[in-house]
Amino acid sequence: MQIRIIKPEIKDLDRLIPLWEEQYKYHHDLDSDYYVTNSEDLTNKFREYLTKSIEKNDPYILVALLDGEYAGFITFKTEEADYFDTNIKKFGSIIELYVSGKYRRKGIGTKLMESVENFFKEKGLEWVELQCSSYNEMALIFYDKSEFKNRQTLLFKRIS
């Protein structure tokens, strides 16, 4: 079992889209009030987003290959806080981390996370932030083991 972390190329897009759709279905199934149902239009928007990510690093993207199969991906970028009252001004932001269900618990998420943390360290950053659905219990356990601490909570209330 060999895990390789690579930066995908445009030629890899057709292999990446099904993995992206799988993660979207996973998140939609967790919280269909928040996430819209997938559609052809949404898949096209994913394709545009991933194309921009691959071609312009906006955001950056890495893919995990397990024995040559697309097993997971991570998207990330650098950020600067616009709050004037915080000590953490510049930080790395993980936008999406996903490992396909059939490849979980094999160290893929850890390898993706290590790659991104190393990238941020090379940029001179000391902090990484991410947002995670409170319904995603597996991810919350993973992030806790990865030493992330909850500093803020995003709350929603239906008012209609």
Image (cartoon, rainbow, N blue to C red):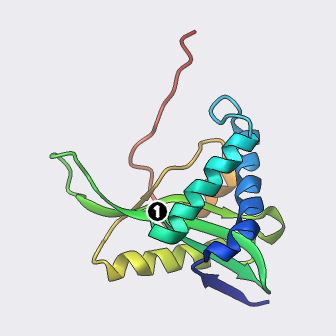
- Please name the residue shown 30% across and 72% down the image: 125
Residue most extreme to the bottom: 2
- Give the image location of residue 77, x and y in percent: 41, 64
Q: Residues within 10 Å of mark 1 (few under 14, many from 20)?
A: some
Query: As rendered, which of 73 and 53 lies closer to the eye?
Result: 53
- Residue 68 is drawn in which quadrant? bottom right
- Give the image location of residue 106, x and y in percent: 75, 77
- Give the image location of residue 32, x and y in percent: 71, 33
Query: As rendered, which of 14 and 5 lies closer to the eye?
Result: 14
- Please name the residue shown 66% across and 62% down the image: 98
- Please name the residue shown 22% across and 47% down the image: 82
Element assignment for label 1: loop
Query: As rendered, which of 142 and 82 lies closer to the eye?
Result: 82
Q: Is residue 46 above or below residue 36?
A: below
Q: Which residue is mark 1?
A: 59
- Residue 160 is drawn in which quadrant? top right
Q: Where the N terminus falls, by quadrant?
A: bottom right
Residue most extreme to the right: 102
Amino acid type, callout 1: Pro
Q: Is residue 61 above or below residue 7?
A: above
Residue most extreme to the top: 160
Count of numbered circles on the image: 1
- Residue 89 is drawn in which quadrant? bottom left
